[in-house]
Image (cartoon, helix red, strand yellow):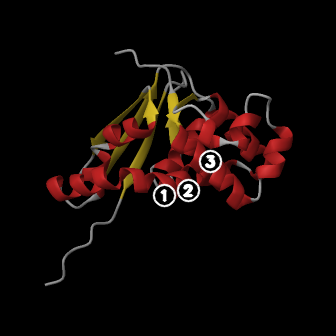
Amino acid sequence: MQSLDPLRYSRSILKGYLAELGRLGLVEEVQKRGSAELLPLLDSSLSAPRWLSAAPFDEIMALVATLRGRDAVRGLGHSVMSDRMVTVLEPVMSLALLMFGRDPGSLFSRAHQMASVVSQGVEVIWAPSGHNGGTLRVRMEDPQPALSWVAWEGVFAVPTLPAYPAADGRSGAIDVSWISKVAEV
């Protein structure tokens, strides 16, 4: 298996996390409980480096889980993707739908390219299983905390389906399905 770069996320993901903390009313509580390394990023995400290690994201997820539970972490992943990243990824998504078909499989099959816009050291593989579903496999070089996989559930907009992390913590799978709309005649 090919080695991956160290896991890093873009500053825009951090901005999304901070916006969601604000929406949840958790900013003050996270500031009280956050580490010395996290606090400067909470105060001014604009001055954060373009790429950040996974550590501040892991810490934010742990604090959200402590304060609001596992579902809030899933919601964090979903909200960041739907509220912030869709804007960044919309041109790629539109092109994929235009060129390769107008169903979710067209997007999932290009999830790796979309993930590379906002993350490094992440491999995303789409394995279709029929016309209306498949499995997304996400892999990183190093083991990830369990809450990281919970956030990935939300990223792929399937908040009711669990991610299945591998025993080594380096990869996980998310089963995805949808109902195709049949054109009326």
Q: CA distance from mark 2 to mark 3?
A: 9 Å
The location of residue 76, given as percent across then percent down, is: 61, 51
Q: State the residue position of label 1.
A: 82
Q: State the residue position of label 3.
A: 17
- Report the amino acid beneath label 2: Ser
Q: CA distance from mark 2 to mark 1?
A: 5 Å
- Report the amino acid beneath label 3: Tyr
Q: Are marks 2 and 1 in contact (CB under 8 Å)?
A: yes
Q: State the residue position of label 2.
A: 79
**Residue at image coords 62%, 37%:** 47
* Picture quadrant of residue 24: bottom right
Q: Please tell me whether mark 3 sits on a helix, a strand or a loop.
A: helix
Q: CA distance from mark 1 to mark 3?
A: 12 Å
The location of residue 130, given as percent across then percent down, is: 24, 51
* Picture quadrant of residue 101: bottom left
Q: Please tell me whether mark 2 sits on a helix, a strand or a loop.
A: helix
